[in-house]
Image (tube, rainbow, N blue to C red):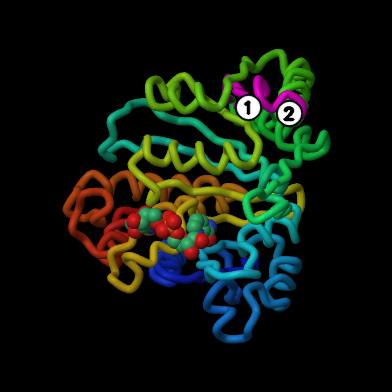
Amino acid sequence: MKTITLFEGDGIGPEITQATLDVIQALQLPLQFEKYDIGQTAYEKCGELIPTVSIDSIKKNKVALKAPVTTPVGKGFRSVNVQLRIIFDLYANVRPAKLLPNVKSRYENIDLIVFRENTEDLYIGEETVISADEVHAIKKITRKGSERIIRSAFEYAVNNNRKKVTCVHKANILKKSDGLFLDIFNTIKEEYPQIEANDVIVDNACMQLVMRPEQFDIMVMPNLYGDILSDLTSGLIGGLGLLPSAQMNDEYAIFEAVHGSAPDIAGKGIANPTALLLSACMMLDYLGYQQEANKVRNAIIKTLANLEDCTPDLGGKSSTTHYTQKIISNL
Ligand code: NAI
């Protein structure tokens, strides 16, 4: 029996977690979940955003499924997600944007994956107040950090029969920092002659994604561009409610939806659980249950065919529970 650490999160977190568990449990796999708190709920219960027991559980189980959390707004609170990435050095944030059949979108044939560097760039949070009118923020790009995310993008391409890796950067302006990232990309690509490789400046990448997204396959980039571009890619495939992710290194993996805790719809029973469920499918792939993961993906596609069974963000009128039950009956 494999044990997985489970975080129900805040806002819509508990609703979409229950839905995801209901579907996974219907597969009757030898998996069990160990539930801990992080985020606002943990803070309200024990005064800590990331309690030690929660960290210890990830250390023990190595794999976690995490619903979105709310970082309380106010001075002194560092984002729970950024902290988790740093504690476990989860350098690769993998965000696949695949347009599922039956989802309404302006596009066709989108099947791209953003590899976002997850531990460096402006997200190290080193900001210095120079004066009341001036603040400086540090953008950190290292050889080690760049090499490992770029290499994992190429390795993924090779192992999953993908054709092309695109580096997204702003090396024309940030000549030293993004310049280093691009130099490393250009060196590593030589080791993978079977994979097509190119690079695109981030502003052009945004335009190209909106105009001709089908040209992209694997995209690798520093942290900030990865954060922004992956939300953009969610818009191409039907919205945030459909975009899963994995944050990982060679030892640990945390699977979660890209979206946040959606306080505006929390408690209404209308949240779309698909992104968390697809993240759980990535987890099943990772644990060696590819067949079962594909079974869930097919059940989701089948359910999406009938708009009446879908949640409001997809244009339907159904509740989270109704949509989930339909997926289970389509398994
Ligand atoms: P958000 O992603 O929670 O919501 C943006 C919009 O998308 C809202 O209108 C929301 O209703 C909708 N939405 C998101 N997920 C949905 C779903 N599954 N089904 C239907 N509609 C959905 O982003 P926002 O409002 O900027 O952030 C809210 C909170 O979430 C903040 O406290 C933020 O810090 C946190 N957050 C947490 C993340 C995580 O834990 N991974 C990631 C992003 C934000």
The residue nearer to you, when weighing 135 against 326, is 135
User: Does residue 10 lie above or below 96 as drawn?
Assistant: below
| Residue in view at x 65 percent, y 79 percent | 48
Q: Residue furthest right?
A: 144
Which residue type carries mark 2?
Phe
Towards the viewer: 155 or 124 = 124
Specify the segment rendered in magenta: 162-176
Quarter of the picture holding the N terminus: bottom right
Label 2 within 8 A of ligand 1 by Cβ:
no
Tell me, yes or no, whether the two marked residues, 2 and 1, touch with CB atoms within 8 Å. Answer: yes
| Residue 309 position within the rendered picture, expressed as x and y whole percent measured from the top left | 21, 55
Dot 1 lies on which element?
strand
Residue 176 is at least partly visible in this image = yes
- SS state under label 2: helix
Q: Which mark is residue 169?
A: 1
Left or right of residue 266, residue 200 in this image: right
- The residue lying furthest to the front in this view is 132
The C terminus: image quadrant: bottom left
According to the picture, the residue beneath numbered tag 2 turns out to be 181
Residue visible at 25% across and 64% down? 319
Q: Residue at horizontal 49%, vertical 51%?
A: 258
**Kind of residue indicated by mark 1:** His
Q: Is residue 238 magenta?
A: no
